[in-house]
């Protein structure tokens, strides 16, 4: 089956999905739908307002727009016309989003896989797996090394900061405690450090460091370190969007600790989010092909549907 794909929104995620579709032989790209008239791509670009006209040309529409407002405002509209996949990442509103997508998709015989990516997404799958294994599981999630957009924006608001970026890093001793089965009392605050890199005039360094490390909520409760670097160093070392983390679950089995762990070390957050999204795009096309409709979380999608291999091939190659 060759899956005809459309992409809505051409930011980091949309560009990464386009790249993957070009690399995978079971997908082909129909085109990109954007609010902007021209994009820096060789693909065909359509105005997003016209998307519904192409509903019969597309098997899966990748919704690569932002989670803050775009997905709540637009996603269900797309689910009326297309089988969709999204990476909606507002954890507290996933159930609401799922309900809206389910209604729109079911009414129109489409499939909508919601909140793919890695958190939510692959982390969610591994949280559920870990928690299902033990009578009294202890579970911790650690994030990082990761670039935090919100905290980077906050440091850039401090007077005198010319360039700034913030990374969240999990504390190694907290990870070790979690692995040993002692993660019960760990809080997010004490389990993570914040490392900040700033470009600023030397005369402002002390004040900037003080303002950042004492910033309520954002930095004050955390172990925060501020480094000042040259513009050249910033340009060389701080242009990427790394992220990742660990989901660690332990259980006591008759006095024996069992530790189950899923970890990600990503040099580029959007590139990997796209990789997960595209695999779920494959599953969405297959679910639809099998005659299903409605919304699915990642937890409801049979794992084999993500793979390019068939279930039979997987069993024959010694799963
Ligand atoms: P971007 O900010 O790069 O893009 C979001 C939208 O903004 C695009 O779809 C695009 O729409 C518009 N846009 C992008 N660049 C420009 C520009 N230069 N000028 C004008 N408009 C632009 O976000 P990302 O692609 O990095 O992320 C998308 C979403 O993915 C995030 O909101 C986040 O919630 C989610 N995500 C989920 C993860 C998960 O694990 N579940 C992990 C990481 C991210 P248009 O083409 O229509 O203009």
Image: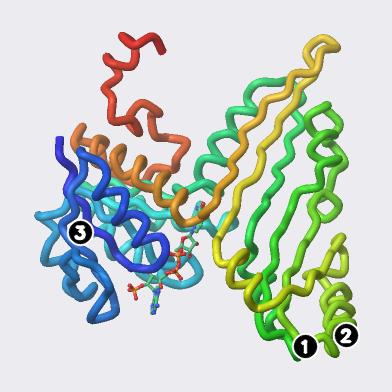
Quarter of the image where the C terminus is located: top left
Reading the image, the residue beneath label 3 is: 81
Residue at point 38%, 29% (across, down) = 302
Report if the CB atoms under discs 3 and 1 are less than 8 Å apart: no
At label 3, counting other C-alpha atoms closer than 10 Å, the crowd grade (few under 14, some 14-19, many 20 or more) is: many
State the residue at coordinates (66%, 30%).
261
Q: Quadrant of ligand 1?
A: bottom left
Relative to 192, residue 36 above or below: below
| Residue on which disc 1 sits | 201
- Residue 244 in the figure: left or right of residue 270: right
Q: Give left or right: position of 162 versus 102.
A: right
Disc 2 packing (10 Å; few <14; some 14–19; many ≥20) = few
Q: Name the residue under label 2.
A: 207
Disc 1 crowd rating (10 Å Cα; few below 14, some 14-19, many 20+) is few
Q: Distance between the residues labelled 3 and 1?
A: 54 Å
Circles 2 and 3, Cβ within 8 Å, touching? The answer is no
* Labels 1 and 2: the sequence-earlier one: 1
Q: Quadrant of the N terminus?
A: top left
Quarter-wise, where is residue 146 in the image?
Answer: bottom right
The percent coordinates of residue 168 (x first, y second) are: 72, 58
Tell which tag, 3 or 1, sits nearer the viewer. Answer: 1
Q: Mark 1 falls on what kind of element?
A: loop
Relative to 120, does residue 282 appear above or below in the rendering? above
């Amino acid at each position: 089956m060759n899956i005809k794909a459309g992409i809505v929104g051409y930011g980091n995620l949309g560009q990464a999905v386009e790249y993957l579709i070009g690399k995978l032989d079971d997908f082909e790209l129909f085109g990109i739908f954007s609010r902007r008239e021209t994009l820096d791509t060789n693909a065909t670009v359509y105005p997003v307002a016209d998307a519904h006209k192409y509903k019969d040309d597309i098997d899966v529409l990748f919704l690569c727009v932002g989670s803050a407002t775009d997905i709540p405002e637009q996603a269900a509209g797309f689910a009326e016309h297309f089988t969709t996949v999204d990476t909606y990442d507002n954890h507290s509103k996933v159930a609401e989003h799922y309900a809206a997508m389910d209604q729109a998709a079911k009414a129109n015989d489409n499939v909508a896989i919601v909140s793919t990516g890695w958190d939510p997404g692959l982390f969610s799958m591994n949280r559920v797996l870990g928690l299902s294994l033990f009578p009294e599981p202890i579970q911790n999630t650690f994030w990082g090394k990761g670039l935090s957009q919100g905290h980077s924006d906050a440091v850039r608001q401090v007077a005198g900061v010319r360039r700034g970026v913030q990374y969240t890093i999990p504390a190694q001793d907290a990870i070790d405690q979690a692995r040993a089965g002692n993660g019960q009392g760990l809080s997010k605050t004490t389990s993570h450090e914040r490392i900040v890199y700033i470009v600023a005039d030397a005369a402002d360094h002390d004040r900037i460091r003080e303002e950042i490390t004492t910033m309520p909520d954002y930095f004050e409760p955390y172990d925060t370190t501020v480094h000042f670097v040259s513009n050249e160093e910033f340009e060389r070392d701080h242009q990427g969007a790394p992220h990742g983390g660990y989901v660690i679950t332990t259980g006591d089995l008759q006095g024996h600790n069992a530790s189950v762990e899923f970890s990600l070390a990503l040099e580029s957050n959007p590139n990997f989010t796209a990789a997960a999204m595209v695999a779920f795009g494959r599953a969405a096309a297959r679910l639809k092909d099998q005659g299903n409709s409605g919304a699915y979380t990642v937890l409801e999608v049979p794992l084999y549907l993500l793979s390019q291999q068939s279930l039979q091939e997987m069993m024959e190659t010694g799963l």
